[in-house]
Image (cartoon, rainbow, N blue to C red):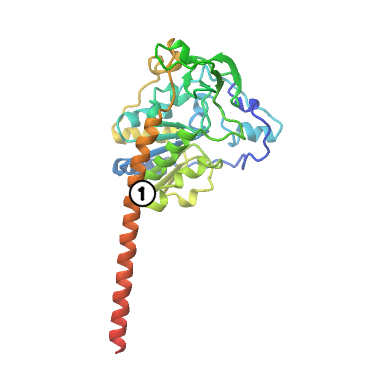
Amino acid sequence: MSCNYAEGLSAYENKGVLGVPENFDSEEIVNQKCKELANLIKESKHVVIHTGAGISTSAGIPDFRGPKGVWTLEQKGEKPTFNISFDEAQPTKSHMALRALVDHGYVHYIVSQNIDGLHLKSGLDRKYLAELHGNIFIEQCQKCRRQFVRQTAVEKVGQKLLDLPCRSIDMDNSRSCRGGVMHDNVLDWEHDLPERDLDMAFMHSTLADLNITLGTTLQIVPSGNLPLKNLKHGGKLVICNLQPTKHDKKAFLGISSYIDDILTKVCKRLGIEIPDYSDESDPTKHSNIAEWTLPQEYVKALDKLFKEHQKITAKKRENSSLKCKHLIDEKSIKKRKCSE
């Protein structure tokens, strides 16, 4: 399938701010900021990455709102030039770096707006990934809701039926679904976000002491607001993007450079070797059927942790409030004594 999957979506007028010029920090500033980012990651207990189309452009997949983005060109009556299909596209340096950061325990979760399947192809485990807008290499059963990996990109998008029976009947287990039909799981404009993925993304983003956005202008909601969820708990936000975003003023750190370069420098400072892409780690290259369903058990386990965190946070607020009240009362007493 062509990388311009947007052609298969329904018409939609409000596509955000398009074609804003890109900014580039100098090499010296990028080096300084990458050093600071590596230290932030090292010092943080819960790091969540938020990825947008900007991490896939070096794989030959165009973004949407960049100077040569799909929708920017569409506004001008033009179309992007494609050099690659989704089937041919391979994970970038950034995708492989993120998998390495997860494998080494520096990154704890990834929230992605991308449908290109490159996180899947990198070998990233499903339990570390929320796919908020779907995945072009995934089929989902409309009856049992289980998801399965395809070897090729779907030809239809927008959660359309594929005239295929539920893949569970081809798997050697007792959970086979009778009567289910597969559909693609790429969202169209009017679709609700997948509940389990959204729940995981929301809780991880809130629990994070460091949210890092990579290659997104943060215009689409609710995805674009998730990185802000930790700010009221004292967490930090880092924005890495060539175009300005609407949340730049809320960021603790902003880096304007190519994402591949940023993550290469960060991994080097953390002493992490970025692996090369391998067919062996890519489920789309395997002949056997692989399941991609996000287990409800993951959501329940995180929900328990999230509620405990909320209780602790509420208790801290209560103690802080009591402490402030005590200080105010002490000041009032001192004032009364002085006046007497």
- Callout count: 1
Label 1 sits on residue: 310
Specify the farthest residue to the bottom. 340
Can residue 313 be seen by looking at this rendering? Answer: yes
The answer to which of 27 and 184 lies nearer the viewer is 184
Amino acid type, label 1: Gln
Q: Residue at x 32, y 28 (%)?
A: 103
Q: Residue at x 49, y 48 (%)?
A: 248
Give percent across and percent down for residue 304.
34, 40
Query: Which image quarter holds the C terminus?
Result: bottom left
Can residue 108 be seen by looking at this rendering? Answer: no
The answer to which of 262 and 280 lies nearer the viewer is 280
Q: Secondary structure at mark 1?
A: helix
Horizontal side, residue 239 vs residue 38: left or right: right
Give percent across and percent down for residue 78.
69, 29
Query: Which image quarter holds the N terminus?
Result: top right
Give percent across and percent down for residue 250.
46, 51
Give percent across and percent down for residue 71.
64, 34
The answer to which of 122 and 317 lies nearer the viewer is 317
Position above or below: 264 against 245: above
Position above or below: 31 against 118: below
Horizontal side, residue 160 vs residue 59: left or right: right
Q: Residue at x 44, y 22 (%)?
A: 292
The answer to which of 136 and 251 lies nearer the viewer is 136
The crowding category of the residue bearing disc 1, from other C-alpha atoms within 10 Å (few below 14, some 14 to 19, many at least 20), is some
